[in-house]
Amino acid sequence: MKTWEKNIRKVVPYVPGEQPKGDKLIKLNTNENPYPPGPGVSRALGAMDFEGLRKYPDPAARALTDCLAEYYGVGTDQVFVGVGSDDVLATAFLTFFNSEKPILFPDVTYSFYKVWAELFGIPYETLPLDETFSIRPEDYYKENGGVIFPNPNAPTGLFLGLSQVEEILRHNSDGIVIVDEAYIDFGGQSALKLLAQYENLLVVQTFSKSRSLAGLRIGFAIGSPRLIAALNDVKYSYNSYTMNLPSLALGVEAVRDEEYFQETIKKIVSTREKAKKRFRELGFSFPDSMANFIFASHEKVPAAELFSALLREKIYVRYFPKPRLENFLRITIGREEEMEALFVFLEEQVSGWKP
Protein backbone atom coordinates (compact mmCIF):
# COMPACT_ATOMS: atom_id res chain seq x y z
CA MET A 1 0.00 0.00 0.00
CA LYS A 2 1.30 3.44 -0.94
CA THR A 3 1.61 6.01 1.84
CA TRP A 4 -1.15 8.24 0.47
CA GLU A 5 -3.53 5.30 0.27
CA LYS A 6 -3.51 4.97 4.04
CA ASN A 7 -5.36 8.27 4.34
CA ILE A 8 -8.21 7.41 1.99
CA ARG A 9 -11.53 6.99 3.78
CA LYS A 10 -12.68 3.38 3.57
CA VAL A 11 -16.43 2.86 3.41
CA VAL A 12 -18.87 0.18 2.31
CA PRO A 13 -21.17 2.20 0.04
CA TYR A 14 -24.91 2.07 -0.43
CA VAL A 15 -25.85 0.03 -3.51
CA PRO A 16 -28.67 1.67 -5.48
CA GLY A 17 -31.14 -0.33 -7.53
CA GLU A 18 -30.18 -1.18 -11.08
CA GLN A 19 -31.18 1.32 -13.78
CA PRO A 20 -31.50 -0.87 -16.89
CA LYS A 21 -31.71 0.69 -20.34
CA GLY A 22 -34.09 -0.18 -23.16
CA ASP A 23 -37.78 -0.13 -23.98
CA LYS A 24 -38.78 -3.77 -23.78
CA LEU A 25 -38.49 -4.25 -20.04
CA ILE A 26 -40.60 -3.92 -16.91
CA LYS A 27 -38.88 -1.90 -14.19
CA LEU A 28 -40.25 -2.63 -10.72
CA ASN A 29 -37.06 -2.40 -8.69
CA THR A 30 -36.57 1.16 -7.42
CA ASN A 31 -40.04 2.28 -6.26
CA GLU A 32 -40.36 4.97 -8.90
CA ASN A 33 -43.81 6.25 -9.82
CA PRO A 34 -45.03 4.49 -12.99
CA TYR A 35 -46.90 7.60 -14.11
CA PRO A 36 -45.37 10.82 -15.52
CA PRO A 37 -45.21 14.12 -13.64
CA GLY A 38 -48.30 16.33 -13.69
CA PRO A 39 -49.33 18.62 -16.54
CA GLY A 40 -48.13 21.72 -14.72
CA VAL A 41 -44.61 20.32 -14.63
CA SER A 42 -44.72 19.66 -18.37
CA ARG A 43 -45.94 23.17 -19.12
CA ALA A 44 -43.33 24.78 -16.90
CA LEU A 45 -40.57 22.75 -18.52
CA GLY A 46 -41.63 23.94 -21.97
CA ALA A 47 -41.77 27.57 -20.84
CA MET A 48 -38.49 27.50 -18.91
CA ASP A 49 -36.16 30.49 -19.29
CA PHE A 50 -32.89 28.83 -20.25
CA GLU A 51 -31.11 32.20 -20.17
CA GLY A 52 -31.61 32.10 -16.42
CA LEU A 53 -29.43 28.99 -16.12
CA ARG A 54 -26.31 31.13 -16.43
CA LYS A 55 -27.03 32.51 -12.96
CA TYR A 56 -26.78 30.80 -9.60
CA PRO A 57 -30.12 29.65 -8.15
CA ASP A 58 -31.59 31.13 -5.00
CA PRO A 59 -29.56 29.54 -2.18
CA ALA A 60 -32.57 29.73 0.15
CA ALA A 61 -34.79 28.01 -2.47
CA ARG A 62 -37.58 30.33 -1.35
CA ALA A 63 -39.98 29.61 -4.21
CA LEU A 64 -40.09 25.93 -3.26
CA THR A 65 -39.90 26.31 0.53
CA ASP A 66 -42.68 28.91 0.47
CA CYS A 67 -44.83 26.64 -1.70
CA LEU A 68 -44.28 23.66 0.59
CA ALA A 69 -44.94 25.75 3.69
CA GLU A 70 -48.29 26.90 2.29
CA TYR A 71 -49.23 23.37 1.18
CA TYR A 72 -48.49 21.77 4.55
CA GLY A 73 -49.71 24.69 6.67
CA VAL A 74 -46.40 25.46 8.40
CA GLY A 75 -44.11 28.48 8.61
CA THR A 76 -41.59 29.17 5.87
CA ASP A 77 -38.90 28.86 8.54
CA GLN A 78 -39.98 25.25 9.14
CA VAL A 79 -39.03 23.90 5.70
CA PHE A 80 -35.64 22.71 4.43
CA VAL A 81 -35.07 21.36 0.90
CA GLY A 82 -32.27 19.31 -0.60
CA VAL A 83 -31.16 17.16 -3.51
CA GLY A 84 -33.53 14.30 -2.83
CA SER A 85 -34.39 13.06 0.65
CA ASP A 86 -30.99 11.33 0.72
CA ASP A 87 -29.28 14.73 0.76
CA VAL A 88 -31.70 16.00 3.40
CA LEU A 89 -31.17 12.92 5.59
CA ALA A 90 -27.38 13.01 5.21
CA THR A 91 -27.40 16.66 6.28
CA ALA A 92 -29.61 15.76 9.24
CA PHE A 93 -27.16 13.02 10.29
CA LEU A 94 -24.31 15.55 10.20
CA THR A 95 -26.32 18.18 12.02
CA PHE A 96 -28.09 16.28 14.79
CA PHE A 97 -26.30 13.01 15.51
CA ASN A 98 -23.20 14.20 17.32
CA SER A 99 -23.56 12.49 20.68
CA GLU A 100 -21.22 9.78 21.92
CA LYS A 101 -24.34 7.68 22.48
CA PRO A 102 -25.51 5.43 19.64
CA ILE A 103 -28.33 6.46 17.39
CA LEU A 104 -31.09 3.87 17.00
CA PHE A 105 -32.77 2.50 13.87
CA PRO A 106 -34.32 -0.83 12.82
CA ASP A 107 -32.21 -3.76 11.65
CA VAL A 108 -34.40 -4.17 8.56
CA THR A 109 -34.75 -0.68 7.11
CA TYR A 110 -33.31 1.75 4.56
CA SER A 111 -29.71 0.60 4.26
CA PHE A 112 -28.35 4.11 3.75
CA TYR A 113 -28.74 4.79 7.51
CA LYS A 114 -25.90 2.44 8.34
CA VAL A 115 -23.76 3.85 5.52
CA TRP A 116 -24.14 7.44 6.74
CA ALA A 117 -23.47 6.47 10.34
CA GLU A 118 -20.25 4.73 9.38
CA LEU A 119 -19.21 7.46 6.93
CA PHE A 120 -19.66 10.21 9.53
CA GLY A 121 -18.31 8.18 12.45
CA ILE A 122 -21.64 8.12 14.29
CA PRO A 123 -22.12 5.26 16.77
CA TYR A 124 -25.30 3.32 16.07
CA GLU A 125 -27.35 0.36 17.22
CA THR A 126 -29.83 -1.55 15.08
CA LEU A 127 -32.93 -2.84 16.82
CA PRO A 128 -34.55 -6.04 15.47
CA LEU A 129 -38.02 -5.89 14.00
CA ASP A 130 -40.36 -8.46 15.52
CA GLU A 131 -41.39 -11.71 13.82
CA THR A 132 -43.97 -9.84 11.72
CA PHE A 133 -41.34 -7.28 10.58
CA SER A 134 -42.93 -4.61 12.79
CA ILE A 135 -41.11 -1.89 14.75
CA ARG A 136 -41.49 -2.27 18.53
CA PRO A 137 -41.76 1.27 19.95
CA GLU A 138 -40.63 0.13 23.39
CA ASP A 139 -37.22 -0.82 21.97
CA TYR A 140 -36.60 2.90 21.40
CA TYR A 141 -37.26 3.98 24.96
CA LYS A 142 -33.67 3.52 26.09
CA GLU A 143 -30.87 6.09 26.23
CA ASN A 144 -29.56 7.04 22.79
CA GLY A 145 -28.02 9.74 20.62
CA GLY A 146 -31.04 10.06 18.33
CA VAL A 147 -33.65 7.96 16.56
CA ILE A 148 -34.49 7.51 12.88
CA PHE A 149 -36.93 5.18 11.14
CA PRO A 150 -38.96 5.17 7.92
CA ASN A 151 -42.73 5.18 8.13
CA PRO A 152 -43.93 3.22 6.23
CA ASN A 153 -40.79 1.18 6.69
CA ALA A 154 -38.68 0.00 3.76
CA PRO A 155 -38.41 -2.64 2.45
CA THR A 156 -41.34 -4.08 4.44
CA GLY A 157 -43.95 -1.40 3.66
CA LEU A 158 -45.43 -1.61 7.16
CA PHE A 159 -46.83 1.56 8.74
CA LEU A 160 -46.38 2.43 12.40
CA GLY A 161 -49.50 4.11 13.80
CA LEU A 162 -49.31 7.75 14.82
CA SER A 163 -49.94 6.92 18.48
CA GLN A 164 -46.92 4.59 18.45
CA VAL A 165 -44.78 7.24 16.76
CA GLU A 166 -45.80 9.62 19.51
CA GLU A 167 -44.80 7.08 22.16
CA ILE A 168 -41.30 7.02 20.67
CA LEU A 169 -41.24 10.83 20.73
CA ARG A 170 -42.44 10.99 24.34
CA HIS A 171 -39.64 8.69 25.45
CA ASN A 172 -36.96 10.62 23.52
CA SER A 173 -37.43 14.23 24.56
CA ASP A 174 -33.66 14.69 24.96
CA GLY A 175 -32.76 13.74 21.37
CA ILE A 176 -33.79 14.30 17.78
CA VAL A 177 -36.31 11.89 16.27
CA ILE A 178 -36.37 11.73 12.47
CA VAL A 179 -39.35 10.12 10.75
CA ASP A 180 -38.48 9.31 7.15
CA GLU A 181 -41.77 9.48 5.23
CA ALA A 182 -40.69 8.71 1.67
CA TYR A 183 -43.83 6.58 1.16
CA ILE A 184 -46.36 8.31 3.41
CA ASP A 185 -48.58 9.52 0.56
CA PHE A 186 -49.50 5.91 -0.28
CA GLY A 187 -51.04 5.21 3.14
CA GLY A 188 -51.09 6.22 6.79
CA GLN A 189 -51.09 9.49 8.71
CA SER A 190 -48.05 11.74 8.55
CA ALA A 191 -46.17 12.60 11.73
CA LEU A 192 -46.50 16.24 10.64
CA LYS A 193 -49.57 16.28 12.90
CA LEU A 194 -47.22 15.99 15.88
CA LEU A 195 -44.92 18.91 15.05
CA ALA A 196 -46.72 21.42 17.26
CA GLN A 197 -46.17 19.20 20.31
CA TYR A 198 -42.61 17.99 19.70
CA GLU A 199 -39.87 20.49 18.93
CA ASN A 200 -37.38 17.62 18.50
CA LEU A 201 -39.28 15.99 15.61
CA LEU A 202 -38.04 16.20 12.03
CA VAL A 203 -40.23 14.79 9.23
CA VAL A 204 -38.52 14.07 5.90
CA GLN A 205 -40.33 13.48 2.60
CA THR A 206 -39.46 13.27 -1.10
CA PHE A 207 -40.75 14.10 -4.57
CA SER A 208 -39.19 10.90 -5.95
CA LYS A 209 -42.09 8.53 -5.23
CA SER A 210 -45.58 9.99 -5.11
CA ARG A 211 -44.79 13.11 -7.16
CA SER A 212 -43.05 11.30 -10.06
CA LEU A 213 -39.87 13.40 -9.94
CA ALA A 214 -37.10 10.95 -9.01
CA GLY A 215 -35.06 12.32 -11.91
CA LEU A 216 -35.06 15.86 -10.50
CA ARG A 217 -33.90 14.90 -6.99
CA ILE A 218 -36.05 16.94 -4.60
CA GLY A 219 -36.43 16.15 -0.92
CA PHE A 220 -37.53 18.22 2.04
CA ALA A 221 -37.72 18.27 5.81
CA ILE A 222 -40.28 19.96 8.03
CA GLY A 223 -39.59 20.65 11.68
CA SER A 224 -39.33 23.37 14.30
CA PRO A 225 -37.63 26.63 13.24
CA ARG A 226 -34.64 25.77 15.46
CA LEU A 227 -34.08 22.44 13.72
CA ILE A 228 -34.39 23.98 10.25
CA ALA A 229 -32.01 26.80 11.15
CA ALA A 230 -29.45 24.24 12.31
CA LEU A 231 -29.82 22.29 9.04
CA ASN A 232 -29.27 25.48 7.04
CA ASP A 233 -26.15 26.34 9.04
CA VAL A 234 -24.63 22.99 8.08
CA LYS A 235 -25.79 23.26 4.47
CA TYR A 236 -24.23 26.73 4.05
CA SER A 237 -21.01 25.35 5.51
CA TYR A 238 -20.36 23.06 2.54
CA ASN A 239 -22.65 23.96 -0.41
CA SER A 240 -24.87 27.01 -0.57
CA TYR A 241 -26.46 26.13 -3.91
CA THR A 242 -27.86 22.65 -3.39
CA MET A 243 -31.00 23.08 -5.51
CA ASN A 244 -30.77 23.82 -9.23
CA LEU A 245 -33.15 26.19 -11.03
CA PRO A 246 -35.15 23.54 -12.95
CA SER A 247 -35.73 21.55 -9.76
CA LEU A 248 -36.99 24.62 -7.94
CA ALA A 249 -39.35 25.69 -10.72
CA LEU A 250 -40.70 22.24 -11.56
CA GLY A 251 -40.95 21.26 -7.91
CA VAL A 252 -43.31 24.17 -7.30
CA GLU A 253 -45.52 23.04 -10.18
CA ALA A 254 -45.57 19.47 -8.87
CA VAL A 255 -46.97 20.72 -5.56
CA ARG A 256 -49.58 22.81 -7.36
CA ASP A 257 -50.76 19.83 -9.46
CA GLU A 258 -52.93 18.64 -6.56
CA GLU A 259 -55.75 17.06 -8.59
CA TYR A 260 -53.32 15.06 -10.74
CA PHE A 261 -51.31 14.09 -7.65
CA GLN A 262 -54.35 12.68 -5.86
CA GLU A 263 -55.50 10.88 -8.99
CA THR A 264 -52.11 9.21 -9.41
CA ILE A 265 -51.97 8.13 -5.78
CA LYS A 266 -55.45 6.64 -6.06
CA LYS A 267 -54.43 4.59 -9.10
CA ILE A 268 -51.27 3.25 -7.45
CA VAL A 269 -53.08 2.31 -4.24
CA SER A 270 -55.82 0.58 -6.22
CA THR A 271 -53.27 -1.40 -8.22
CA ARG A 272 -51.42 -2.28 -5.01
CA GLU A 273 -54.52 -3.72 -3.38
CA LYS A 274 -55.34 -5.78 -6.48
CA ALA A 275 -51.73 -7.00 -6.53
CA LYS A 276 -51.98 -8.19 -2.93
CA LYS A 277 -54.91 -10.40 -3.91
CA ARG A 278 -53.06 -11.84 -6.90
CA PHE A 279 -49.90 -12.50 -4.87
CA ARG A 280 -51.91 -14.38 -2.24
CA GLU A 281 -53.60 -16.49 -4.93
CA LEU A 282 -50.14 -17.50 -6.22
CA GLY A 283 -48.95 -18.60 -2.76
CA PHE A 284 -47.00 -15.50 -1.75
CA SER A 285 -47.02 -13.99 1.73
CA PHE A 286 -46.02 -10.44 2.64
CA PRO A 287 -46.41 -7.70 5.24
CA ASP A 288 -49.47 -5.55 4.59
CA SER A 289 -47.73 -2.78 2.67
CA MET A 290 -48.87 0.83 2.87
CA ALA A 291 -46.20 1.94 0.39
CA ASN A 292 -45.89 1.68 -3.40
CA PHE A 293 -44.25 -1.72 -3.24
CA ILE A 294 -44.84 -5.20 -1.82
CA PHE A 295 -42.24 -7.26 0.02
CA ALA A 296 -43.19 -10.81 -0.98
CA SER A 297 -41.99 -14.33 -0.24
CA HIS A 298 -43.28 -17.50 -1.87
CA GLU A 299 -44.16 -20.52 0.27
CA LYS A 300 -42.23 -22.92 -1.99
CA VAL A 301 -40.16 -21.15 -4.66
CA PRO A 302 -36.93 -19.52 -3.38
CA ALA A 303 -36.70 -15.77 -3.98
CA ALA A 304 -33.25 -16.07 -5.55
CA GLU A 305 -34.60 -18.40 -8.23
CA LEU A 306 -37.58 -16.18 -8.94
CA PHE A 307 -35.32 -13.13 -9.12
CA SER A 308 -33.06 -14.81 -11.69
CA ALA A 309 -36.02 -16.00 -13.76
CA LEU A 310 -37.57 -12.52 -13.76
CA LEU A 311 -34.26 -10.97 -14.77
CA ARG A 312 -34.00 -13.27 -17.79
CA GLU A 313 -37.47 -12.06 -18.80
CA LYS A 314 -36.32 -8.42 -18.33
CA ILE A 315 -38.63 -7.92 -15.38
CA TYR A 316 -36.62 -6.05 -12.77
CA VAL A 317 -37.44 -6.35 -9.07
CA ARG A 318 -35.22 -5.89 -5.99
CA TYR A 319 -33.56 -8.77 -4.18
CA PHE A 320 -31.62 -8.41 -0.91
CA PRO A 321 -29.41 -11.47 -0.23
CA LYS A 322 -29.09 -10.64 3.47
CA PRO A 323 -30.10 -12.38 6.71
CA ARG A 324 -33.89 -12.29 7.26
CA LEU A 325 -34.40 -10.89 3.74
CA GLU A 326 -32.91 -13.57 1.50
CA ASN A 327 -36.26 -15.17 0.67
CA PHE A 328 -38.11 -11.95 -0.19
CA LEU A 329 -38.50 -9.83 -3.30
CA ARG A 330 -39.39 -6.15 -3.11
CA ILE A 331 -41.69 -5.42 -6.02
CA THR A 332 -42.64 -1.87 -6.99
CA ILE A 333 -46.25 -1.26 -8.00
CA GLY A 334 -46.25 -0.48 -11.72
CA ARG A 335 -49.01 0.25 -14.19
CA GLU A 336 -51.87 -2.23 -14.46
CA GLU A 337 -50.46 -3.75 -17.66
CA GLU A 338 -46.99 -4.12 -16.14
CA MET A 339 -48.39 -5.89 -13.10
CA GLU A 340 -50.47 -8.18 -15.32
CA ALA A 341 -47.35 -9.18 -17.26
CA LEU A 342 -45.58 -9.85 -13.97
CA PHE A 343 -48.36 -12.08 -12.68
CA VAL A 344 -48.64 -14.04 -15.93
CA PHE A 345 -44.95 -14.82 -15.71
CA LEU A 346 -45.03 -15.60 -11.97
CA GLU A 347 -47.95 -17.96 -12.44
CA GLU A 348 -45.97 -19.86 -15.05
CA GLN A 349 -42.89 -20.01 -12.82
CA VAL A 350 -44.77 -21.05 -9.68
CA SER A 351 -46.88 -23.73 -11.36
CA GLY A 352 -43.89 -25.25 -13.16
CA TRP A 353 -41.40 -25.07 -10.32
CA LYS A 354 -39.74 -28.27 -9.14
CA PRO A 355 -37.41 -28.36 -6.12
Image: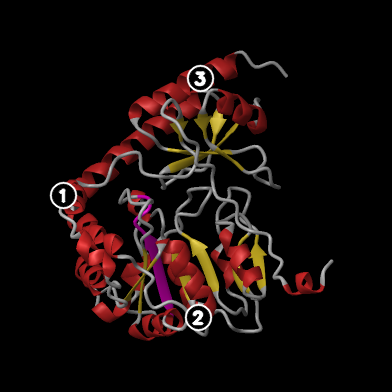
- Image quarter where the N terminus lies is bottom right
Question: Mark 3: which amino acid?
Answer: Phe
Looking at the image, which residue is at 62% across and 64% down?
A: 114
Residue nearest the observer in this picture, 178 or 138: 178
Q: Kindly report which numbered mark, 2 or 1, lies closer to the viewer in this rendering.
A: 1
Residue receiving disc 2: 95
Placement of 80 over or under 185, stated as above or below: below
Residue 345 is marked as 3
Q: Main secondary structure of the magenta part?
A: strand
The reply to whether dot 3 and dot 2 touch (C-beta < 8 Å) is no
The reply to whether dot 3 and dot 1 touch (C-beta < 8 Å) is no
What residue span does the magenta drawing correspond to?
200-209
Nearer the N terminus, badge 3 or badge 2?
A: 2
Residue nearest the observer in this picture, 354 or 94: 94
Label 3 residue SS:
helix
Placement of 157 over or under 270, stated as above or below: below
Residue receiving disc 1: 43
**Residue lying farthest to the top in this orientation:** 352
- Image quarter where the C terminus lies is top right
Position of 158 compared to 128: left or right? left
Residue nearest the observer in this picture, 167 or 37: 37
Image coords of residue 97 (percent x, y): 56, 79
Residue 202 among magenta residues: yes
